[in-house]
Image (spheres, rainbow, N blue to C red):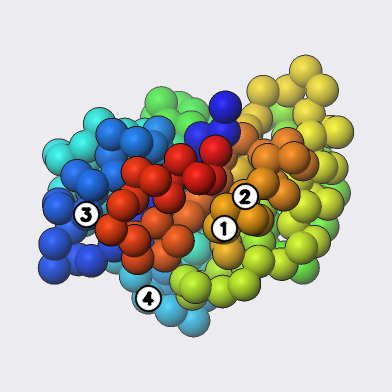
């Protein structure tokens, strides 16, 4: 069954613990978006809030770094409790740097994910698919919540399924996920669905999480 990763970017930070308590028993992952105002035009939270999250839930902490120079900051998020650190292909300068970061994460007992923006083809990931634990397909432009789903993400999910073979990486999709787009992604073969405003804007969050499955 597909895993659900509510994005805390859409939570109410004046009542963060209450919001996390309202979803943590109904989902497998908690998705934590990090934005630096440089790689993407918005700014979100750093590793201190992740450390707080780690204290109040046992969910798998899925950290999405939308930042420049992710290797420089990876250790901070590892120390704060990340189970998975996903970085952007587009944030890296050289193939060797990507391999170095994947190895660094594995050496520190954290799962390694790699993400691509909507305009980036799946084929650029071929040198890394044997080594990563997860591939994150962005179905919106990274940096802002509440955007509409970009349908080309479906083709990318299907390509990643076709390429997987004996590889073990999971396929995650993030952006514009609701009950309709979730079904499209499930049919294409996705493993993990990230959803933010779709879940957190509702009172009955269990119902809306289950609607994604």
Q: Nearer the viewer, mark 2 or mark 4?
A: 2
Give the image quarter of residue 131: top right
Q: In this image, 208 relative to 16: left or right? A: right
Q: In this image, 53 relative to 176: left or right? A: left
Q: Earlier in the sequence, mark 1 or mark 4?
A: 4
Q: Label 4, label 3: how many angstroms apart (C-alpha)? A: 21 Å
User: Which residue bears the numbered disc 2?
Assistant: 182
Q: Label 1, label 3: how many angstroms apart (C-alpha)? A: 19 Å
Give the image quarter of residue 91: bottom right
Q: Secondary structure at mark 4?
A: loop
Q: Which mark is residue 19?
A: 3
Q: Residue 70 location, x and y as percent?
A: 48, 56
Q: In this image, 38 relative to 147: left or right? A: left
- Which residue of the protein is positioned furthest toward the bottom in this rendering? 41
Q: Secondary structure at mark 3?
A: helix
Q: Earlier in the sequence, mark 3 or mark 2?
A: 3
Q: Label 1, label 2: how many angstroms apart (C-alpha)? A: 6 Å
User: Which residue bears the numbered disc 1?
Assistant: 177
User: Which residue bears the numbered disc 4?
Assistant: 43
Q: Residue 44 location, x and y as percent?
A: 34, 70
């Amino acid at each position: 069954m597909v895993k659900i990763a509510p994005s805390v970017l859409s939570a109410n930070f004046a009542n963060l613990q209450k919001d996390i308590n309202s979803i943590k028993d109904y989902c497998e992952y908690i998705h934590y978006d990090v934005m630096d105002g440089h790689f993407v035009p918005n700014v979100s939270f750093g590793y201190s809030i992740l450390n707080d999250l780690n204290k109040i839930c046992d969910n798998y902490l899925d950290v999405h770094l939308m930042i420049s120079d992710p290797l420089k900051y990876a250790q901070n998020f590892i120390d704060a409790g990340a189970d998975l650190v996903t970085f952007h292909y587009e944030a890296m300068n050289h193939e060797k740097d990507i391999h170095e970061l994947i190895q660094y994460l594995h050496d520190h007992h954290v799962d390694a994910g790699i993400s691509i923006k909507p305009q980036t083809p799946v084929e650029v990931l071929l040198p890394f698919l044997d080594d990563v634990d997860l591939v994150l397909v962005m179905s919106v432009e990274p940096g802002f919540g509440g955007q509409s789903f970009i349908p080309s993400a479906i083709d990318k999910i299907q390509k990643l399924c076709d390429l997987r073979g004996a590889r073990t990486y999971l396929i995650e999709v993030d952006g514009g996920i609701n009950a309709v787009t979730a079904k499209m992604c499930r049919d294409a073969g996705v493993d993990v669905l990230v959803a933010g405003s779709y879940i957190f804007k509702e009172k009955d969050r269990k119902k809306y999480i289950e609607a994604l499955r």
